């Protein structure tokens, strides 16, 4: 009789332990932030945009070394028509220029400033042409070839720290008390020009050996354990 009682108590104790284990594990995982992840993408593209502008004299904000400047406004539609979908020029990139009123007037200029207006952009190019004068028409060929190294990530994955620096959260796999766990790790990144309201361009010196967190249903901090959609 006593033996039967001990067996029943032992079975009941094991059942309670199993229930508590399953419940605690389920609650443990349920309480984790649910995140959406994505991988970074390497940039690879080629496009050319032809625009006509007019020569201007240098102003106080222009860099030295050029005697003529040209500002052109490029719309998002013009960028998409090239197949590029986004504008990826950087300051100091080369731009081919030609003065149609004069023969053999081809020259190479340099991007001196870029101002974004949503997905549109104003591009300012510095040129050296002794024969050019303000008001003269200038044909620009904005050519961008493949860039190896830079990464493009969803803008939602980018965060700004208290000191103004940028970072992302990468998700790493670890072995926890209940098996595999996924931990958010704060990772500093350097933002490059060319970012817009949809994507962020990250410097080639940054590497992403793990997926990025794009969104989360709860706040995420460095070291937070997460689960996926």
Image (spheres, grey):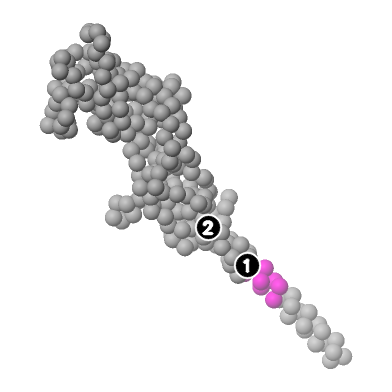
Which residue is labeled 1 in the image? 178
Closest to the observer, 113 or 68:
68
Residue depicted at 38% across the width and 50% down the height: 189
Closest to the observer, 159 or 96:
96
Residue depicted at 37% across the width and 32% down the height: 88
Number of labelled discs? Answer: 2
Q: Is 21 contained in the magenta span?
A: yes
Provide the major secondary structure of the magenta segment.
helix
Image height of 128 relative to 197, above or below: above
Q: Residues within 10 Å of mark 1 (few under 14, many from 20)?
A: few
Mark nearer the N terminus (2 vs 1): 2
Left-right relation of 83 to 173: left
Q: Which mark is residue 172?
A: 2
Residue depicted at 48% across the width and 43% down the height: 40
Residue 123: image location, x then y, percent: 28, 27
Left-right relation of 51 to 41: left
Direction front: furthest residue: 104
Q: Secondary structure at mark 2?
A: strand
Residue 11 seen by the camera: yes
In magenta, the rendered stretch is 17-24
Q: CA distance from mark 2 to mark 1?
A: 16 Å
In the image, which is nearer the foreground, mark 2 or mark 1?
2
Q: Residues within 10 Å of mark 2 (few under 14, many from 20)?
A: some
Location of residue 73 (image quadrant): top left
Residue 117 seen by the camera: no
Q: Secondary structure at mark 1?
A: loop
Are the residues at dot 2 and dot 1 in contact (C-beta closer than 8 Å)? no
Direction left: furthest residue: 60
């Amino acid at each position: 009789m006593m033996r039967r009682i001990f067996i029943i108590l032992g079975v009941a104790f094991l059942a309670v332990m199993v229930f508590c284990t399953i419940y605690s594990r389920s609650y443990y995982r349920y309480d984790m932030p649910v995140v959406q992840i994505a991988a970074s993408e390497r940039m690879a593209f080629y496009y050319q945009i032809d625009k006509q502008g007019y020569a201007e004299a240098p102003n106080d904000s222009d860099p030295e070394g050029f005697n003529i400047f040209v500002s052109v406004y490029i719309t998002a539609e013009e960028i998409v028509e090239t197949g590029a979908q986004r504008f990826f020029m950087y300051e100091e990139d080369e731009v081919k220029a030609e003065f149609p009123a004069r023969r053999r007037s081809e020259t190479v200029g340099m991007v001196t400033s870029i101002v974004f207006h949503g997905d549109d952009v104003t591009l300012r190019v510095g040129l050296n042409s002794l024969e050019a004068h303000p008001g003269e028409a200038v044909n620009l060929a904005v050519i961008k070839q493949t860039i190896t190294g830079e990464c493009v990530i969803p803008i939602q994955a980018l965060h700004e720290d208290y000191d103004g620096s940028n970072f992302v959260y990468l998700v790493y796999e670890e072995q926890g008390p209940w098996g595999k766990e996924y931990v958010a790790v704060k990772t500093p990144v350097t933002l490059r020009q060319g970012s817009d309201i949809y994507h962020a361009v990250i410097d080639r010196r940054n590497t992403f050996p793990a997926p990025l967190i794009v969104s989360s249903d709860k706040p995420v901090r460095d070291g937070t354990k997460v689960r996926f959609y």
